[in-house]
């Protein structure tokens, strides 16, 4: 992982699971992730499908509209769609966050580098059937001004464990239509610098993220918790 917000998110995920294989969605405090909320999403991962339940406003803008109810795999190219289900099922089975490095392409062939982490979660059950995700653009966002991401291509992936990780390369991205900062291509790697220490991982300042304190995701997360509470009462 390269983006410090993703380091922070995985560290927070590890903290709130409290020794369990994975935390429950009700353990997530939107206030703890408030600076990340525009880039946070929830996926329902039951029945071998991966559907957006919620997504931050910035992500919805970058992918061209409301993501809730949309299949996560539809935004990816054919090769990536064939790879991702196996990777995501492995992350759920091992209760380990999944790291994805990808290239997003607009309709007019502008490109951005994206880093995504998917963290397994439970929802009012023992089974891990959801992902808490964070997606960050790593390169200049100027190519997305007035445009949305038309499709995404997987470049590399890895399971993120405390103290070490393994990276798997995918096929190379398509030829770029315009110059951009080259992607770092990683071989299988192990690094102590990836050890998760929550106190050392800080999100970027609010003004860098353009966070809106009234972001809809915070309200929707609270509504999910309220729905869960009503389910227990009934």
Image (cartoon, rainbow, N blue to C red):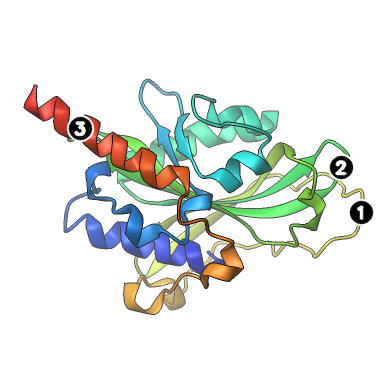
Q: Is residue 51 left or right of residue 131?
A: right
Q: Secondary structure at mark 1?
A: loop
Q: Where residue 133 sits in the image (x, y, percent)?
A: 45, 47
Q: How many marks?
A: 3
Q: Residue furthest front?
A: 214
Quadrant where the C terminus is found in the figure? top left
At label 1, counting other C-alpha atoms closer than 10 Å, the crowd grade (few under 14, some 14-19, many 20 or more) is few
Q: Residue 123 sits in which quadrant?
A: top left
Pointer 1 residue:
178
Nearer-the-camera pick, 151 or 25: 25
Number of the label disc, if any, that sits on residue 108: none
Q: Where residue 184 sits in the image (x, y, percent)?
A: 70, 65
Q: Where residue 168 sits in the image (x, y, percent)?
A: 56, 52
Q: Residue 124 sits in which quadrant?
A: top left
Give the vertical position of 95 relative to 4 (above or below): above
Asked whether the viewer can see residue 161, the reply is: no
- Contact (CB < 8 A) between labels 1 and 2? yes
The residue located at (23%, 30%) in the rendering is 227
The residue located at (86%, 42%) in the rendering is 109
The tag earlier along the polypeptide, 2 or 3, is 2
Pointer 2 residue:
109
Q: CA distance from mark 1 to mark 2?
A: 8 Å
- Contact (CB < 8 A) between labels 1 and 3? no
């Amino acid at each position: 992982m390269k983006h410090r917000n993703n380091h922070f998110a995985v560290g927070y995920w590890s903290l709130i699971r409290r020794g369990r294989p994975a935390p429950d969605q009700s353990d997530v405090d939107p206030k703890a992730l408030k600076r990340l909320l525009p880039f946070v999403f929830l996926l329902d991962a039951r029945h071998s499908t991966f559907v957006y339940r919620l997504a931050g406003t910035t992500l919805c803008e970058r992918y061209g509209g409301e993501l809730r109810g949309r299949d996560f795999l539809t935004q990816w190219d054919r090769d990536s769609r064939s790879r991702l289900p196996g990777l995501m099922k492995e992350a759920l089975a091992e209760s380990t966050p999944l790291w994805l490095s990808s290239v997003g392409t607009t309709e007019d062939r502008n490109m951005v580098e994206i880093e995504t982490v998917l963290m397994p979660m439970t929802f009012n059950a023992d089974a891990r059937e959801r992902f808490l995700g964070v997606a960050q653009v790593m390169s200049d966002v100027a190519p997305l001004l007035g445009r949305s991401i038309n499709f995404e291509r997987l470049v590399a992936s890895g399971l993120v464990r405390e103290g070490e990780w393994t990276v798997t390369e995918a096929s190379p991205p398509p030829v770029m239509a315009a110059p951009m900062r080259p992607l770092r291509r990683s071989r299988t790697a192990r690094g102590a610098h990836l050890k998760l220490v929550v106190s050392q991982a800080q999100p970027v300042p609010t003004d860098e993220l353009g966070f809106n304190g009234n972001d809809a995701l915070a309200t929707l997360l609270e509504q999910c918790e309220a729905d869960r509470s009503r389910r227990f009462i009934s």
